[in-house]
Image (cartoon, rainbow, N blue to C red):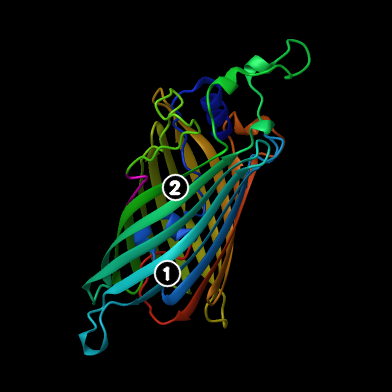
Amino acid sequence: MRVLSLIFCLSFGVTIQAQDVAFTQYYAAPLLLNPSLVGAASGKFRLTAINRDQWGNVLVEPFSTFGASMDVRFNAGFGKSDNGDLIGAGISFFKDKVTGLDFSTTRMTFYGAYHKLLDRNTKQYLSGGLSIGINTQNVNYDALFFGDQFNGTNGFDLPTGEDDNPIVNNITYSDIAVGFNYTISPSKDLSIHSGLAIHHVSEPSNTFYEDEEEPGESVVPRKITIHASAIMRMEGDVSVIPRAIFTSQGPHNNLILGSNLRLGIKNTAGTAIQLGLWVKPSFQSEGGVNLDAITLLTGLEFRSLILGLSYDLHVSDINVAGNQRGSFELSVTYTGEDESEDVLCPAF
């Protein structure tokens, strides 16, 4: 979809309504999910990295998406004035590349959040966060061919009228997101989390045309994300972690719904296996709902280190065009200097 949107924009000069890349293991990229989750970890700092390869056999070369982040947390009060509030700060790096077209997006984002303690007994927090990012997009036009270049027989070697419209190879624009998160642990066996984030608040322009008054002017549509999850601890160091995320951006509405099962390994404190099964319904423009993908996940926890591997088995018509019908994601999360049992957001 991103490839087609780019070509359509450059060829015909219309406004595009593409959507952001979405990680299946979205809680393994908490800062990209919601800026209010910065610092929402049990340790003083957290490092994350996630990589996704998509459409490996539908396209000649797959989409490749990589994200990494670092965030820290510290007490808002000091000494006897400690009120239980927390402050979070962080930075993230994101790169999305379509190698076949040599089109890439790079983003560097800075975050800040405040976690207000509402009740100590239920570990109830209300968090608010803000992020400010710098986005750069690059395209190599030598890798693109337009309809007016087709010679009518066997190639695209004619000149293109696109030279009449001044276009640039790279653009840079700033971006703002805000978010809120609420968490409560009414008992030691239950934690509930919910959040709301608004990305691209100002809907920044990302046109490749030098003259923004030309028909090729485009913007990044505002994106609204709603996410919710719970951690329900059972007997025998077993936990069930249901979760859901809904995103709406322009004409696109997406949903991920499912659950993880966490199985603690006996006689090895802090070590566990996670298994997950999720579904991705897609909402059609005519009002129907189709199943886009089924996701299988496995993860390993080694105290402060968490490894996650997921596979999206695509079942929609466009995704089964190739022999490889899936997308892989690999994530790594490390939480350092664990100092609190408060859980402001799930691990992944």
Question: Which amino acid, by three-letter code, is at mark 1?
Answer: Met
Locate residue 230: give its quadrant.
bottom left
Q: x%, y% of residue 66? A: 58, 53
Q: Earlier in the sequence, mark 1 or mark 2?
A: 1
Q: Residue at the spot x=54%, y=26% of the render? A: 10
The alpha-carbon separation of the residues under discs 1 and 2 comes to: 21 Å
Whether residue 309 appears in magenta in the rendering, the answer is no
Q: Which mark is residue 234?
A: 1
Mark 1 neighbour class, 10 Å CA radius: few under 14, some 14 to 19, many 20 or more: few
Q: Nearer the viewer, residue 23 or 303?
A: 23
Q: Residue at the spot x=63%, y=21% of the render? A: 146
Main secondary structure of the magenta stretch: strand
Q: Provide the residue designation for mark 2.
A: 257
Circle 1 or circle 2, nearest the eye? 2
Q: Nearer the viewer, residue 103 or 188?
A: 103
| Above/below status of 283 relative to 201 | above
Mark 2 neighbour class, 10 Å CA radius: few under 14, some 14 to 19, many 20 or more: some
* Magenta residue span: 197-201
| Above/below status of 43 relative to 110 | below
Q: Residue at the spot x=45%, y=74% of the render? A: 45
**Element class at badge 2:** strand
